[in-house]
Image (cartoon, helix red, strand yellow):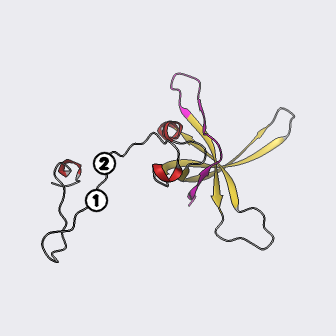
Amino acid sequence: MNKAILMGRLTRDPEVRYSQGENSTAVARFTLAVDRRFKRAGDTQDADFIGCVAFGKQAEFVEKYFRQGMKMVAVGRIQTGSYTNKDGIKVYTTDVVAEEIEFAESKGASGGDTGYQNNREFKPEPSSAMGDGFMNIPDGIDEELPFN
């Protein structure tokens, strides 16, 4: 099984390009700074910088909503490859191909503008009945519930 789950901050704005051809596809490249859980004695680096790539709808999502410094969760697979650069030297690559991408903190916590707006804050009110274990649901929110 090849599965990677990363949570970290973008080191810079994602770089998005579109493939050539009839069915152009968005390709987003970005680097996540992922904090290490444990620090070894004498280790000066507190984070690993992991290259990621996303395709299609995920790439467009990254382009629209994510900026440098924002915290994200990326779930995908590790992919290795190689190419020969212009000097004739073979270069080996390792990237995480992000298949699922999510926000890892609220808009206010990052201090940046993510473009996401949550205009409605849901704060349940305690039930008026004593100890029945249920809460009152405010009027107008019933269409957002997954059941009716």
Quick check: is 138 in the magenta stretch? no
Res 91 quadrant in image: top right
Tag 1's secondary structure? Answer: loop
Tell me whether the residue at label 2 lies in contact with that at label 1, contact meaning CB atoms closer than 8 angstroms: no
**Percent coordinates x, y for residue 119 in the rendering:** 33, 45
Question: What's the residue at 83%, 32% (across, down)?
Answer: 86
Name the residue beneath numbered marker 2.
120
Quick check: is 20 in the magenta stretch? yes
Residue type of the residue flagged with mark 2: Arg
Name the residue beneath numbered marker 1.
123
- Left or right? Give the position of 35 relative to 134: right
- Whole-number angstrom distance, CA of label 2 to CA of label 1: 10 Å
**Percent coordinates x, y for residue 64 in the rendering:** 49, 36
Crowdedness near tag 1: few (<14), some (14–19) or many (≥20) residues, C-alpha within 10 Å: few
Q: Which residues are magenta?
A: 1-26
**Foreground residue, 92 or 138?**
138
